[in-house]
Amino acid sequence: AQSVTQPDIHITVSEGASLELRCNYSYGATPYLFWYVQSPGQGLQLLLKYFSGDTLVQGIKGFEAEFKRSQSSFNLRKPSVHWSDAAEYFCAGRNAGNNRKLIWGLGTSLAVNP
Amino acid sequence: EAGVVQSPRYKIIEKKQPVAFWCNPISGHNTLYWYLQNLGQGPELLIRYENEEAVDDSQLPKDRFSAERLKGVDSTLKIQPAELGDSAVYLCASSDRTGADTQYFGPGTRLTVL
């Protein structure tokens, strides 16, 4: 069955430190993969997406993610975290093709220490 | 370009009362989604529209929930009667079919049922 797994429920990092949020997927074919961020009381904002081409994807707010087929991963990274990055991060994916239903991970809550 | 618009942002009602949420998608987006998000969890799809047709409503509790998108643009989600367990955030998203069919979300409506 198709699934998206975010192994880390909660992560705390210090401001200025690097960040990596993990996302693993289970799909038969090439997936379309997305990272969204949700600040408290806000909707979901798209950070970046992968659906073809270069496996290293650049997004907004200084985030990037790398699609690694061999590891079934699409981890989100940022070299230096800012206090405003504290939020909930969701990974989502779907198969290319007519089934357009997104499968969502459970989210990773990021806290940033000053 | 305007994003997905939702109203109201917050709603507090007594149980057994009706409630309605409104969504206006991004201009030109034919696909509209309604999601439910409980605290600390990812979004759960309630219904997906392609233009005015509901193409996936398998997760919509049809005994009390209904939705419409009469002219294929804006949409209304209704709950009647509301129950305590309906307290959640209701998110609307829209997409077009280009690229990865990326979903863009509105700010959501936070519903509290007392």
Image: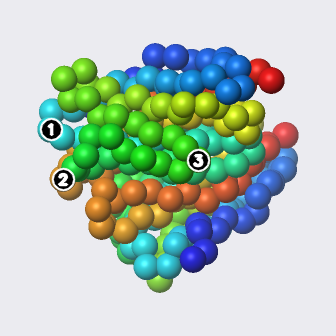
Q: Position of residue B37 (x, y in %)?
A: 60, 40
Three-letter amino acid code of the residue under disc 2: Gly
The extreme bottom residue here reads B71
Three-letter amino acid code of the residue under disc 3: Lys
Q: Position of residue A77 (x, y in %)?
A: 48, 31
Q: Which residue is mark 1?
A: A29
Q: Is residue B19 visible?
A: yes
Q: Chain of mark 1?
A: A
Q: Secondary structure at mark 1?
A: loop
Q: Which residue is mark 3?
A: A61
Q: Earlier in the sequence, mark 3 or mark 1?
A: 1
Answer yes or no: are tags 2 and 3 on the same subunit: yes
Q: Is residue B65 visible?
A: no
On residue A74, the disc is none
Residue A62 falls in image quadrant = top right
Q: Earlier in the sequence, mark 2 or mark 3?
A: 3
- Could you tell whether A39 is left or right of A78 in the image? right
Distance of label 2 from label 3 (alpha carbons)? 30 Å
Residue at the image position 71 percent from the left and 26 percent from the top = A15
Answer yes or no: are tags 1 and 2 on the same subunit: yes
Label 3: few (<14), some or many (≥20) within 10 Å? Answer: few
Q: Which residue is mark 2?
A: A97
Residue at the image position 66 percent from the left and 19 percent from the top = A13
Three-letter amino acid code of the residue under disc 1: Ala
Q: Earlier in the sequence, mark 1 or mark 2?
A: 1
Q: Nearer the viewer, mark 2 or mark 3?
A: 3
Residue at the image position 47 percent from the left and 48 percent from the top = A59
- Could you tell whether A68 is left or right of B34 in the image? left
Quadrant (top left, top right, bottom left, bottom right) of the N terminus of chain B: bottom right
